[in-house]
Every structure is written in structure tokens, then in C-alpha cells.
Image (cartoon, grey):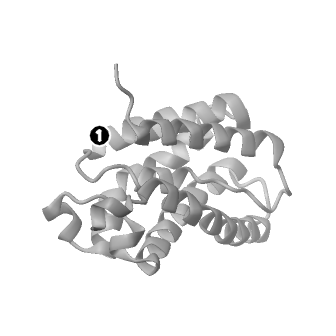
Amino acid sequence: MRISSLTVKYILLLIAQILLGNFFNFSQFIMISVLPVMVLMLPIRRSTAFCLVIAFIMGTAVDFFADGHLGLTAAALLPVAALRRPVIMFVFGNELFSREEDISPQRQGWEKILLATAICTAIFLAFFIIIDSAGTRAAWIDLIKFILSTILSTAVSMSVGNLIGSESEAKWK
């Protein structure tokens, strides 16, 4: 059985997210998650159903091994997987789907990757924070957490997106 390099990258990044959740809890106002960009960067040829299953598995693994609230990360990650196709259409246009070309910073440019990553991260964090607080915290606390976490998670996710979406130089020659 041959495992692709993309699968190995995803497994290692999932382990990194679990370690990040366990050992780097900075503050109640900051949460770092790279899971939305991992869902965004799944191969274009994969269906929405496949992305939903992968998002559920990744979210459940993080819930089980890191956060402790079973179902919270999975529930917040599923809307990202469900809205992945419309976000890609909005940011990149129809071109990626017609060519069945994967998202790549080298081809699509960093500005578009940043916008798509920020949108997916905002969707994830909005659901995560709303479900997590369940109306028990003041709205200003949730708003501060949303803004700070979106900025920081998007910044960290850009390097993850580069790792997942990078193409070899040989492909360009």
C-alpha cells in the first residue's frame, strides 16, 4: 500500500494541530487553528461529501486528543467543508474546477490564497466560538476572541497553505 506525500503532510499537520491545542493555550482570547486551510487545500477533484468526511475525521481527532469537547471542532469544521466549493468559486473563479487544478500559491497568488484562508478561518471560528460559548459569555469577549484568533490563525495558516499547496520547481520548467 502506497501512501501519498499529501496524506503524510495532512497526518503530520493534524498531529501538529493536536500538539498546538494541548501545549500552546496562549489565552482565553486567542485560539490558533490550521484545520480550515487544511480543508480548503484538499484536492479540487474531491467531492463535497469527501471533504465533509475528512473534516469530520480531523475535527473529531482534534476533539478527542486535544480540546476535550467531543464534537465541537468537528461541528465547526463541517460548515467550512460544506462551503469550500462556493468559497473557491468566489475567490478563484471557475478556472480551478474546469482545469481540475489544485490550489497553489505559485499559480493563484498569495493575495487570493490569503483571502480564501481568511474566509474559511472566519467561518470556522464563528461557528466554534458561538457553539463553545452557547450564550454564556459576554458578546464583546466572543468578538475579541473572534478577531484576534482570525488574524493569528490566518497568519499561521498561510505557511501551512504554502506547505500543502507548494509545487515542485520541476513542474514549472
Name the amino acid type tagged 1. Ala
In the image, residue 102 above or below residue 52: below
Choose top left, top right, bottom left or bottom right for residue 167. bottom left
Q: Residue furthest bottom?
A: 111
Q: What crowding class fits label 1: few (fewer than 14 Cα within 10 Å), some (14-19), or many (20 or more)? A: few
In the image, residue 126 above or below residue 57: below
Give the structural element (helix, strand or loop) at label 1.
helix
Q: Decide if residue 167 is on the left or right side of residue 144.
A: left
Q: Is residue 169 visible?
A: yes
Choose top left, top right, bottom left or bottom right for residue 72. top right
- In the rendered image, residue 30, in percent from the top left (x then y), is placed at 77, 61
Q: Name the quadrant of the N terminus.
A: top left
- In the rendered image, residue 171, in percent from the top left (x then y), is placed at 29, 61
* Picture mark count: 1
Q: Residue at x 37, y 49 (%)?
A: 42
User: In this orientation, which residue lies closer to the viewer: 70 or 6?
Assistant: 6
Q: Residue furthest top?
A: 1
Residue at image mark 1: 49
Q: Residue at x 56, y 55 (%)?
A: 127
